[in-house]
Image: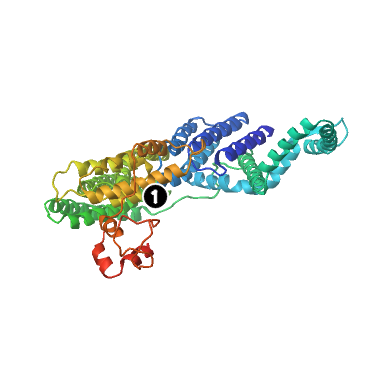
Amino acid sequence: MKLAIICSLILSIIHSILFFGEDWGISVLLFAISAVFIFIFVLGKNGKIKKKSPLILSVPIILLSATYLLFNNMFFAIMNFFVIISLFLIMIIWACTGELNPIKLLKNMWILFFAPVTEIAEVAKEFSNNFHVEKTPGKAKNPIAWKIVKALLISLPIVIIVVALLVAADDTFGVIFKDIVNAIFSWINIGTIYKFAIRIVFAVLLTIYFVGAILKVTRGKINNDVKPGRKGLRIEGMTLGFLITFLNIIYFIFTGIQVMHIVQQINVSDITNYAGYAREGFFQLMVVSFINFIIILLSKLNKKEMGVGSKSYIKSMNFILALFTVVLLVTSVIKMTLYAQEFGYTFLRILVFVTQITELLLILPTLVYIISDKFKVAKWYLGIIVIMYVLFNFMNVDYFIAKQNIDRYLNNENAQTRKLDFEYLRKHTSADAIPQITRLLNDKDEKLQREVNNYLYTQKENINEKEMTWQSFNISRFIAKLELNKYNLEYKYYNSYNNRKNNTIYEKGNNNYYDDDYDYDYDYDYDYDDYYNNNYYSNYYTDL
């Protein structure tokens, strides 16, 4: 267990170096690689890895951690934090138990993640047992820490006396030593000591946590055994048969109505009404699809004894239910495609497509699972979901959204339908989208050109203001910085404001006077003549 303690201490020190006081960036990738390697190494040395195939999950773990280096999407930055931890726990538990039972897996994930805090006494005992030396046979043990303290107490007074004598003996040495002491004390202040103490405490707590987690695994406190006396899910065959039959009839009617509705709406001139219908229909179909998956899985997990005829009937109804799910999902894809073509792309719409494709792929192992009771559907579900999620991350969603919407805007020569929701790009995309947004700097629409200029000016100021350390290095922010530095951006005020700014009425003491230091929000395109004539101009900017 000494190896586990040393490795946990190394991992906590790496964590402190990479993350303390730093933003996420390449640090996440480096820590993920270190954590995966160290845990696999320690568990392998202790002979606790029963199955090596689950270690393939280290690939998506490292790929997802690399997104903190490559991209700048805040949604994925938060979401991936939980996904990476979940995949790491699944990998360790699956490898150490050799089984992937969903119910047991969730229980063991809870134990492995939260229970190490209860192992503090056990960890302290391990430290005591592993880090000591014997004086001589038959004598008491002396901790190494006490030997270090004793050595310092004896050495420091002698060193101080010697240094004092040398300072008195040579003025040059005294000056040099004084400069060294002053430099040390200028660096060591209350703030520095406080931060260093916090880092030490946090590193110790992390070490205890990591050691506690390893103890949970190596001492058999997570397992995949089935508790005796559990009978599993038991539902009457007739109940299942009626339920699935009724649902298939309802889905048949629902599918027919949806198809007819889509055909009718394609030729409707008021696309706005259809857009609302399409988006609402998607969420309805998502719920329906989810219900179908749950019913199929519950019917397969049913332990109630049934006749051969009942089993065959339920299996047939489940197969039809899965096929209806495919029809509903394809209908949903068509509706959202029409919606996106009319109004462009957003993160939610991209998420819709990815979810639909994922569900369609999940249908394939579900159909096999319905036919074969021995088919391990959980592994296929996990594999498909993880692969689709990783692909979604590496799609660079913000860049894709900006490119598609700007291409759609620039390629449309019809002035009446040439629209771009720049408000969405400004508020809901990250630095990933900046290389595409710069394409709008010379747009013929002066209002859009001004908004783009002011947005990019603000982004340039923000990016240049905060210098990236090597721990927080991010390629997307670095590329955005290089791209923005190509342009000599200056904040552009509204023309109406610039004209009035030079008038004599804008004098100190006048209610309508504004200082240049105000940060004017370029998003509001009001009639400034009305604001000026009604004395609203100053109140408007004061509220901002």
Residue, far bottom: 534
Say which element carries label 1.
helix
Quadrant of the drawing holding the N terminus: top right
Q: Residue 501's spot in the image, x, y percent?
A: 31, 58
Q: Nearer the viewer, residue 114 or 439?
A: 439
Residue nearest the observer in this picture, 454 or 428: 454
Query: Which residue is the extreme one toward the front?
Result: 504
Q: Amino acid at mark 1?
A: Leu
Residue on which the image places disc 1:
298
Q: Is residue 483 visible?
A: yes
Image location (x, y in percent) of residue 145? 77, 38
- On the image, the x and y values in percent for residue 159 come to 82, 34
Q: Where does the C terminus fall, quadrant-wise? A: bottom left
Whether residue 245 can be seen here: no
Q: Could you say which is closer to the camera, residue 524 or residue 504?
A: 504
Q: Quadrant of residue 134?
A: top right
Q: Residues within 10 Å of mark 1 (few under 14, many from 20)?
A: some
Give the x, y percent position of residue 171. 79, 32
Q: How is the image coloured?
A: rainbow
Judge whether 414 appears above or below 96 on screen. Answer: below
Q: Is residue 288 left or right of residue 45?
A: left
Q: Is 337 left or right of 106, judged from the image as shown?
A: left
Q: Quadrant of residue 503?
A: bottom left
Residue at horizontal 65%, vertical 35%? Answer: 4
Q: How many marks?
A: 1
Residue at figure coordinates x 30%, y 45% from the top left: 350
